[in-house]
Image: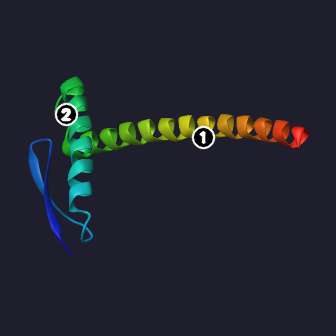
Amino acid sequence: MPEVSITINNREHKIACSAGEEERVKELSLLLDSEVINIANSLGQIGDVKLMVLAAITILDKNQDAIEDAIKIIDNSTKKIEKISQKIEKKA
């Protein structure tokens, strides 16, 4: 199993991942590191565990918002498609 070296909050960590996932792990670690840095800049160095938990919650919150937005877009698109389909059926 490949191992990737990542840096979070200026600390290096070795992370095992599936073959072929190395670049994705590196990309995700950059996202996590960015959130940790933002939180550390706001609250100070409150400990790695707390920083990681707050960063994870922040990322999950953003992810959940994106999912909810996508669901709304899909629902609206579905309604539009159904209206168009009904108009087409009436003309046929």
Along the line of sight, which residue is nearer the eye, 68 or 48? 68
Residue furthest to the front in view is 92
Q: Which residue is mark 2?
A: 37
Q: How many marks?
A: 2
Identity of the amino acid at label 1? Ile
Q: Quadrant of residue 36?
A: top left
Q: Quadrant of the C terminus?
A: top right
Q: Which residue is mark 1?
A: 71
Residue 87 drawn at (x, y percent) = 84, 36
Residue 17 drawn at (x, y percent) = 25, 67
Seen at 37% across and 40% down, the residue is 59
Q: Is residue 78 above or below residue 6?
A: above
Identity of the amino acid at label 2? Ile
Along the line of sight, which residue is nearer the eye, 69 or 53? 69
How far separated are the C-alphas under marks 1 and 2?
31 Å
Seen at 33% across and 38% down, the residue is 54
Query: Which of the two marks, 1 or 2, is nearer to us in this view?
Result: 1
Q: Is residue 19 above or below residue 75?
A: below
Q: Are marks 1 and 2 in contact (CB under 8 Å)?
A: no
Q: Quadrant of residue 57?
A: top left
Mark 1 burial class by Cα count in 10 Å: few <14, some 14-19, many 20+: few
Q: Secondary structure at mark 2?
A: helix
Residue 47 drawn at (x, y percent) = 19, 40
Q: Is residue 72 left or right of residue 57?
A: right
Q: Quadrant of the N terminus?
A: bottom left
Check the image and tell me how it is coloured.
rainbow
Residue 84 drawn at (x, y percent) = 77, 36
Mark 2 burial class by Cα count in 10 Å: few <14, some 14-19, many 20+: some
Seen at 21% across and 41% down, the residue is 33
Seen at 72% across and 39% down, the residue is 81
Q: Secondary structure at mark 1?
A: helix
Residue furthest to the bottom in view is 1
